[in-house]
Image (cartoon, helix red, strand yellow):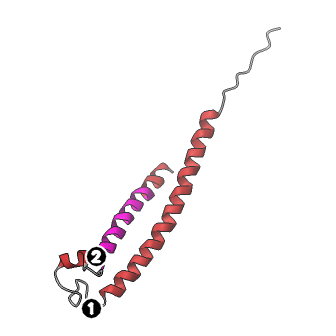
Amino acid sequence: MTFLYYFFLITFFFLSLLMATVILMQDSKSMGLGASFGGDSGNSLFGTSTADVLKKFTAYLAGIFLISCLVLSFWTSSLHRLKTVASKEVAVEQVADNQ
């Protein structure tokens, strides 16, 4: 269970980096990071319909990001609750009756 949690956590960080990169690649009013790849608004790295493809890809990434953020949030809180319940358990000793 712990391996799965950390796997999803690392995947979430990778998703965050991918989303930031895709957002920075998009053209803006001042050309943004798109100018770093060489070219103006007519010359794009991925073809002529780059703006539409990147907008759709960003929208899908944002949806996946939000869902994974909620899932990890609930998962983390449930793990925390399990740890606090386990730490509050009191060991009860039985006393032998020696009569």
Q: Does the magenta stretch include residue 17?
A: yes
Secondary structure state at the residue bearing disc 2: helix
Total labels: the figure holds: 2
The kind of residue tagged 2 is Met
Instruction: Provide residue 25's location: percent of width, then percent of height.
Output: 28, 76
Viewport quadrant of the C terminus: top right
Instruction: Provide residue 42's location: percent of width, then percent of height.
Output: 22, 91
Give the residue at mark 2.
25
Q: At 56% from the left edge and 45% from the top edge, which residue is drawn?
A: 80
Q: Decide which of tag 1 and tag 2 comes sooner along the chain.
A: 2
Give the residue at mark 1.
48
Instruction: Provide residue 95's location: percent of width, then percent of height.
Output: 75, 17
* Residue 12 to residue 21: above or below: above
3D distance between C-alphas at marks 1 and 2 = 14 Å
For the residue pair 1 and 36, the one nearer the viewer reads as 36
Q: At 43% from the left edge and 78% from the top edge, which residue is drawn?
A: 59
Q: At 80% from the left edge and 13% from the top edge, which residue is drawn?
A: 97
Residue 33's disc is: none
Q: What stretch is highlighted in magenta?
A: 8-26
Of all residues shown, which one is farthest toward the top? 99
Compared across the picture, whether 34 is left or right of 93 comes to left
For the residue pair 90 and 95, the one nearer the viewer reads as 90
